[in-house]
Image: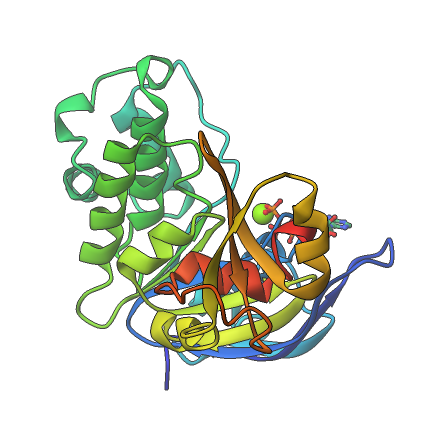
Amino acid sequence: MKNIEVRHLSKLYKNGVTALDDISFTAGSGVFGLLGHNGAGKTTLMKALTTLLEPSAGSIRVCGFDTVKQGKEVRRRIGYLPQELAMYPSLSVFDFVNYMAELKGIHDRRAVNSVLEQVELQDYAKRKIRHLSGGMKRRVGIAQALVGDPQVLVVDEPTAGLDPEERVRFRSVLSRFARDGRTVLLSTHIVEDVHQICGELAVLRKGRLFFAGTPTALMGRVEGKVRLVPLEREEQLAGLQKQAVVLSVTYEKNGISARIMDENTLFPQFAHIPATLEDAYVYCMGGKAHA
Ligand SMILES: Nc1ncnc2c1ncn2[C@@H]1O[C@H](COP(=O)(O)OP(=O)(O)OP(=O)(O)O)[C@@H](O)[C@H]1O
Ligand SMILES: [Mg+2]
């Protein structure tokens, strides 16, 4: 049994939007990345996992418990940091996390102190939420999700808008948590986050699961096929885009260079360059032009 087992999951909203379409994957211990553009279905999937939304079809098991039939058991084992967590700016860090703990039925001030330590906020327990930096607020968000020592942690775009230092700190909090058989499901737009800490990932595209596996396997889809093409004029880009998937474009003083996915070896005159996870992700998404 894996900590997260998603089987043929679909979600059709009342307005007719199919947010998830026959998604299946499993996640064991470690950090599992969920990548996808705006509207791909990441938040919908996370809400279904945390029992906030009922699937239209298919099923989800968390630690072996069905999210619809055994919601209480699931909620007991899952911590959730929503994409937009409402915080009370006038509360202190401790009081806010304690309040969230009490909502979960946990009346234990030591448990609150322990999660503040886990996210390295123990020295800020008395500081008002409104006086925290964006990165610290995000860590308060993680702290409230960690109360009750969940087996599975679901975090929705926690690193968006963080500076590099905070992102590194955040990543280390998540990967530390994900030891000892626990699972973190992390949704993000930031490929770098996934590369650094995720043993496995899934790519969602318009509600469909485009890929599930290791970062290395995803990179394998483009490895040996990425070339750097120098261009003299911007207008050449449109022509190039008709022949190959353009992964990224760099504008420099001496000209423009495009990273392309040369699947059919149309440009053997240009050298191969090592592929990155970003290349593979952009390729999955249909290239820069469609991003
Ligand atoms: N409550 C809702 N009612 C109707 N449609 C919704 C609802 N919530 C989301 N959607 C639609 O479902 C699709 C998936 O949305 P979702 O929020 O899951 O995407 P996302 O991958 O989290 O996007 P983002 O990266 O912007 O957070 C979108 O087309 C969205 O407009
Ligand atoms: Mg979202």
Horizontal side of residue 260 vs 8, given as left or right? left
122 horizontally vs 217: left or right: left
How are the residues colored? rainbow
Residue 180 position, x and y percent, is: 17, 69
Find residue 218 and report its image quarter. bottom left
In the rendered image of this protein, does residue 278 appear above or below residue 64?
above
Residue found at x 42% / y 17%: 89
Question: In this view of the protein, which residue sits in the foreground, 24 or 59?
Answer: 24
Above-or-below relation of 4 to 248: below
Seen in the picture, residue 107 relative to 273 is either above or below; the reply is above
The picture quadrant where one finds residue 233 is: top right
**Is residue 31 toward the left or the right of residue 57 in the image?**
left
Q: Position of residue 280 (x, y in %)?
A: 48, 65
Instruction: Give the residue drawn at x 20%, y 44%.
Output: 111
Q: Is residue 173 above or below residue 162?
A: below
Residue 127 on image: x %, y %: 24, 16
Would you say residue 135 is visible in this rendering? yes
The N terminus sits in image quarter: bottom left
In the rendered image, is residue 5 in sight? no
Q: Name which residue lies at 49% across and 67% down.
A: 269
Q: Nearer the viewer, residue 242 or 86?
A: 242
Image coordinates of residue 289 in percent, x first then y, are 67, 50
Disc tally is 0
Q: Nearer the viewer, residue 4 or 254?
A: 254
Q: Which residue is drawn at the image coordinates 58% and 61% (left, top)?
A: 45
